[in-house]
Each structure stands twice: as structure tokens, then as C-alpha cells.
């Protein structure tokens, strides 16, 4: 039986927090859905780079921000049904704007600074639905009002 496997290098996503605990987000057009999405900065790990090096590079390129305070938040499998690689999540604390955006061909990015209320509103209005961005953000922010255990308890009582 044939199977489709889409091979790729590893990816990274960054939750970039300002000194006010706001997240530096990117709004960009995504060809797959034909619309703009609100996401965490991220990208691909280039050959010879570590995931952390890629995270630092991508944050600077996509947002013009940098940080000296990084933490690894773990990795997820984007879709193990047909992707064999990982998406590494990082936290960059106390980010500061130090440069202009350095976008590649075909990239059109707008920066948005979001507090928790704005992130939740974006989830509600559908502009923040990227699963990998939500995975990274949920490791830093309490995005949902009910803890997962309460949601599970509610569902199992039905």
C-alpha cells in the first residue's frame, strides 16, 4: 500500500514576549487557505543550524526583534500522519526591536503586539487558528478560560 510522506527539515515557532508580557505576533498571507492568519513568528531550520539558532534568526528576520533570554518549550509533531519532522517551540523573553524586517521573496508580514485578551479575541474571531502557533502560545499563556481538566470533567459528565 502506498503512503504519502512529506519530508521537511524541522520547524521552529517563537513566543516572543515584550517586557510587558505581550506577544510579538505576525500576520501573513497563507497560500494553503488563501487568507491572512495571525501567528507566532517561525520558520524552518536551515542546514547546519540548531533549532535555537533558527529561532533567533527567524525572530529577527520576521519581526526585527531579538532577545538575550531564551527558553526551550519542547517540540511537537506537526502531523505525524504524513510529516516525519518536529516543530520546536521557544520562548524569547524581554524582546526588543533592533532592526527592520528582512523578509524573503513572497513574504509579506505585518507585526502585531498582543496581550492575552487580544490573543483570546483573535481565537474567537478565527484570525488565530494556526495549530502550531496555538501549541506554542498555550505553553506560555492560559488561552482557554477553563483548565483542560475541568473541560474533560464537564465532557465526561454528559
Image (tube, rainbow, N blue to C red):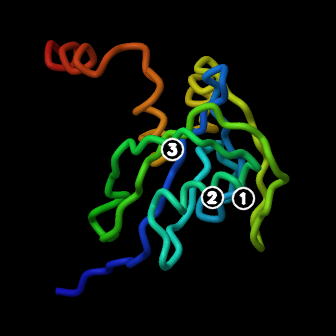
Name the residue located 14 percent from the left edge and 13 percent from the top edge. 157
Which residue is disc 3 drawn over?
A: 133
Residues at marks 2 and 3 touching, judged by CB atoms closer than 8 Å: no
How many numbered marks have been drawn onto this rendered protein structure? 3
Report, in whole angstroms, how far the alpha carbon at label 1 lies from the one at label 2: 5 Å
Q: Is residue 113 above or below residue 155?
A: below
Q: Give the class, few, some or many, for how many residues have Cα within 10 Å of label 2's Cα (few <14, many ≥20).
A: many
Q: Position of residue 33 (x, y in %)?
A: 61, 58
Q: Secondary structure at mark 3?
A: helix
Name the residue located 34 percent from the left edge and 51 percent from the top edge. 75
Residues at marks 1 and 2 touching, judged by CB atoms closer than 8 Å: yes
Q: Is residue 26 above or below residue 80?
A: above
In this view of the protein, which residue sits in the foreground, 53 or 24? 53
Relative side of 26 to 80, left or right: right
Report, in whole angstroms, how far the alpha carbon at label 2 lies from the one at label 3: 14 Å
Relative side of 111 to 33, left or right: right
Q: Position of residue 126 (x, y in %)?
A: 60, 35
- Classify residue 145 by image quadrant: top left
Which residue is disc 2 drawn over?
A: 58
Q: Is residue 120 above or below residue 82?
A: above
Which residue is disc 1 drawn over?
A: 61
In this view of the protein, which residue sits in the foreground, 41 or 91? 91
Q: Give the class, few, some or many, for how many residues have Cα within 10 Å of label 1's Cα (few <14, many ≥20).
A: some
In this view of the protein, which residue sits in the foreground, 131 or 50? 50
Disc nearest the viewer among 2 and 3: 2
Name the residue located 27 percent from the left edge and 65 percent from the top edge. 81
Report, in whole angstroms, how far the alpha carbon at label 1 lies from the one at label 3: 18 Å
- Classify residue 142 by image quadrant: top left
Q: Give the class, few, some or many, for how many residues have Cα within 10 Å of label 3's Cα (few <14, many ≥20).
A: many
Quarter occupied by the N terminus: bottom left
Amino acid at each position: 500500500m502506498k503512503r504519502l510522506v512529506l519530508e521537511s527539515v524541522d520547524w521552529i515557532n517563537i513566543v516572543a514576549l515584550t517586557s510587558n508580557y505581550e506577544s510579538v505576533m505576525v500576520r501573513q498571507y497563507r497560500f494553503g487557505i488563501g487568507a491572512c492568519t495571525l501567528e507566532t513568528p517561525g520558520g524552518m531550520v536551515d542546514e547546519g543550524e540548531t533549532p535555537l539558532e533558527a529561532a533567533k534568526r527567524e525572530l529577527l528576520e520576521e519581526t526585527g526583534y531579538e532577545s538575550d533570554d531564551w527558553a526551550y518549550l519542547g517540540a511537537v509533531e506537526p502531523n505525524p500522519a504524513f510529516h516525519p519532522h518536529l516543530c520546536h517551540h521557544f520562548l524569547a523573553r524581554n524582546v526588543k526591536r533592533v532592526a527592520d524586517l528582512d523578509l524573503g521573496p513572497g513574504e509579506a508580514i505585518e507585526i502585531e503586539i498582543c496581550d492575552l485578551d487580544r490573543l483570546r479575541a483573535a481565537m474567537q474571531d478565527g484570525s488565530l487558528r494556526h495549530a502550531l502557533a496555538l501549541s506554542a502560545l498555550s505553553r506560555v499563556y492560559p488561552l482557554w478560560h477553563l483548565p483542560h481538566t475541568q473541560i474533560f470533567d464537564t465532557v465526561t459528565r454528559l
